[in-house]
Image (cartoon, grey):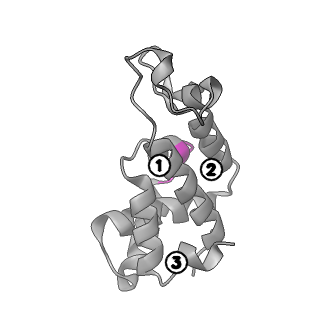
Amino acid sequence: MLEVNPETVCFLILKAHQYDVKLAPEVSDSDSNPPSMDEDALDALEEHEDDPVAEDPVYEEMKSFIDDMNDDAQVDLVALMWLGRDAGGSEDWSQIRADAAEAHNEHSAEYLLGTPMLADYLSEGLACLGYSCEDYQN
């Protein structure tokens, strides 16, 4: 039914959650940092207005990962996101996937990564098709 491995989708869901939970830039001085976090780790989590999104390491990792997928897998990701966003059912999958295939272009990664709540939508899409990331956790 899926051209993309559900475990791959679960990896992207995990990464999308990491990207979504970024901290706002810190306004207080650095002694307020939690002692368990070093400056590099905190910098990786913080968003800075002068840094373009494309320089974010999590964004870059996800973009590269999606760009390296074949077209069918990219179409499935978009279709899963649409399925999860619109709370469709598995009976809608064929049409949603056909629509995603028709809309497919070389900007799938940017489109997906620019979608707020991507992780939630992918997770919901998988659930609609009977998959769960819990099945792929170690």
Query: Which residues lie in the magenta part?
Result: 104-109
| Quadrant containing the N terminus in the rendered view | bottom right
The numbered mark at residue 132 is 3
**Circle 2 sits on which residue?**
66
Q: Is residue 56 visible?
A: no
- SS of the residue under disc 2: helix
Q: Nearer the viewer, mark 3 or mark 1?
A: 3
Question: In the image, residue 27 lies at what x, y percent?
Answer: 37, 17
The verdict on residue 20 being magenta is: no
Q: Is residue 64 left or right of residue 124?
A: right
- Picture quarter containing residue 41? top right
Q: Residue at x 39, y 29 (%)?
A: 24
> Which mark is first along the chain, 1 or 3?
1
Instruction: Residue at 47%, 49% (x, y): give it.
Output: 112
Q: Earlier in the sequence, mark 2 or mark 1?
A: 2
**Image position of 36 with respect to 18: above or below:** above
**Which residue is labeled 1 in the image?**
112
**Residue type indicated by callout 3:** Ser
